[in-house]
Image: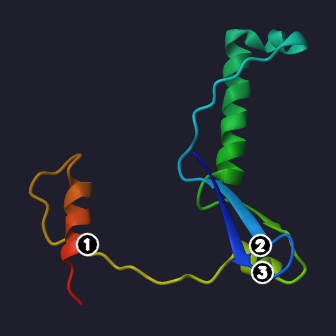
Amino acid sequence: MLYFFFRPLIGDVPLVGGLQVYFLNQPELDFDLGGAGNLLEIPGLNGLLKGAIDDQIARHLVVPNRISVVLSDQVSAESIRMPRPAGILSVRILEARYPGEYCILFALKGLLLAQR
């Protein structure tokens, strides 16, 4: 899933100072090339092309990498590219009884029961 993050809100058009675009996980791409691109349908070349495209997407668009665009002169480029964190969350898991796919559920349950 491709995420668009607009920030900060400003009082003038375009209403936001900038935007960030990113994927949380590597996307799975499926595409076909038409016309002269059909030459790349040869099994070896097809894999090379798809691998190169996947590498470029990962290098530029998968977190922690992202594309940042400044939309207004009212905000600095640094505030869009490297925003200040809203807070810090520290989680310490004390115990997990059923490791594997259920560990996330125990971690989330631990978040809900965490004490200060």
Q: Is mark 3 on a helix, strand or loop?
A: loop
Identify the mark nearer the N-term, 3 or 2. Answer: 3
Q: Do the residues labelled 3 and 2 touch (CB within 8 Å)?
A: yes
Q: Where is residue 80 in the image (x, y as percent from the top left)?
A: 74, 75
Q: In this view, does 101 lie to the left or right of 9?
A: left
Badge 2 is on which residue? Answer: 16
Residue kind at label 3, given as amino acid type:
Ile
Q: Where is residue 68 in the image (x, y as percent from the top left)?
A: 76, 65
Name the image quarter holding residue 81. bottom right
Badge 1 is on which residue? Answer: 111
Circle 2 crowding by C-alpha within 10 Å: few under 14, some 14–19, many from 20: some
Q: Is residue 57 above or below residue 51?
A: below
Circle 3 crowding by C-alpha within 10 Å: few under 14, some 14–19, many from 20: some
CA gap between label 3 and label 2 equals 5 Å
Q: Which residue lies furthest to the bottom in this view?
A: 116
Q: Residue 3 carries which label?
A: none
Q: Is residue 74 above or below residue 13?
A: below
Q: How many marks?
A: 3
- The quarter of the rendered structure image containing the C terminus is bottom left
Residue kind at label 2, given as amino acid type:
Val
- The quarter of the rendered structure image containing the N terminus is top right
Residue kind at label 1, given as amino acid type:
Leu
Identify the mark nearer the N-term, 2 or 1. Answer: 2
Q: Position of residue 58 (x, y in %)?
A: 64, 47
- Depth check, front residue: 6 or 57: 6
Identify the mark nearer the N-term, 1 or 3. Answer: 3
Q: Which mark is residue 10?
A: 3
